Image (cartoon, rainbow, N blue to C red):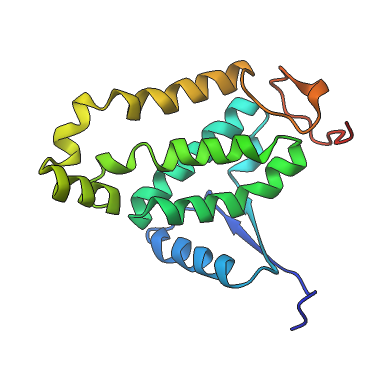
Amino acid sequence: MNTSDKVTIVVDAMGGDNAPQVVIEGIAQALQEDENLEVIVTGLLKKVKTVGSLSFVVMMTSIFSTALLSEAYLSFILNGTVYKKEFDRRGISRVVLARLISEGGLMPAPLMPWTTFGAFCMATLGVSGLEFAPYAFLNYLSPIVSLSMAYLGIGVVWNNPKHKGRRKLPDNIDLTV
């Protein structure tokens, strides 16, 4: 295959697959190894009409992929690669994508004892993430505040500044400044 050939894979994220971990790990590995690979997520993004709903989808998939993969960094790579073109298409800065992925994937990770973050906290502090959970206000509040702000259109960085404060996502957005 030539290096200029682009391969596009469409993944239906609305299916009822009972073993998504293997598929997610395979996609993450393939995306890391081949820069000409493009993944399009269908199903989840069909119903996204607002900045808040797009933020919710990104954050929830970040949480679930961290839980399934047991590693927040793999979740960052996977979700960043999968959603970057959608954010570009909708005219939202990738800064917002990075924030949503980190808040969705990183903040709950220490509370999940099976993740590398949870295992590190348990080994270092001698306290399980589940025991620490009632006191982890930042881990709960950060994603909640971020989603609330996204639904209100606050703190959303648009590629075109004239879209500031917009809540609804247009299908075809003017990307010129």
Q: Residue at x 44, y 64 (%)?
A: 25
Vertical comparison of 164 with 44: above or below: above
Front one among 46 and 59: 59
| Quadrant of the image containing the C terminus | top right
Residue drawn at the location 48% of the way across and 68% of the way down:
26
80 left or right of 113 in image:
right
User: Across the whole image, how many numbered discs are drawn on residues?
Assistant: 0
Q: Using the rendered view, name the quadrant where residue 130 is placed.
A: top left
Location of residue 64 with respect to 139 vertically, above or below: below
Residue 136: x, y in percent?
26, 27
Q: Where, by quadrant of the figure, is residue 1 drawn?
A: bottom right
Apparent side of residue 52 relative to residue 75 in the rendered image (left or right):
right
- In this picture, is 151 found above or below 174? above
Question: What residue lies at 33% left-to-right and 30% top-to-bottom?
Answer: 139
Left or right of residue 131, residue 173 in this image: right
Q: Residue 113 location, x and y as percent? A: 21, 47
Residue 58 in percent (x, y) is at 54, 40
The residue most toward the front is 124
Check the image and report above or below for 134 versus 13: above
Indicate the quadrant where residue 32 lies: bottom right
Seen as rendered, the residue at the extreme left is 126
**Residue 142 rendering spot, x and y as whole percentages:** 42, 26
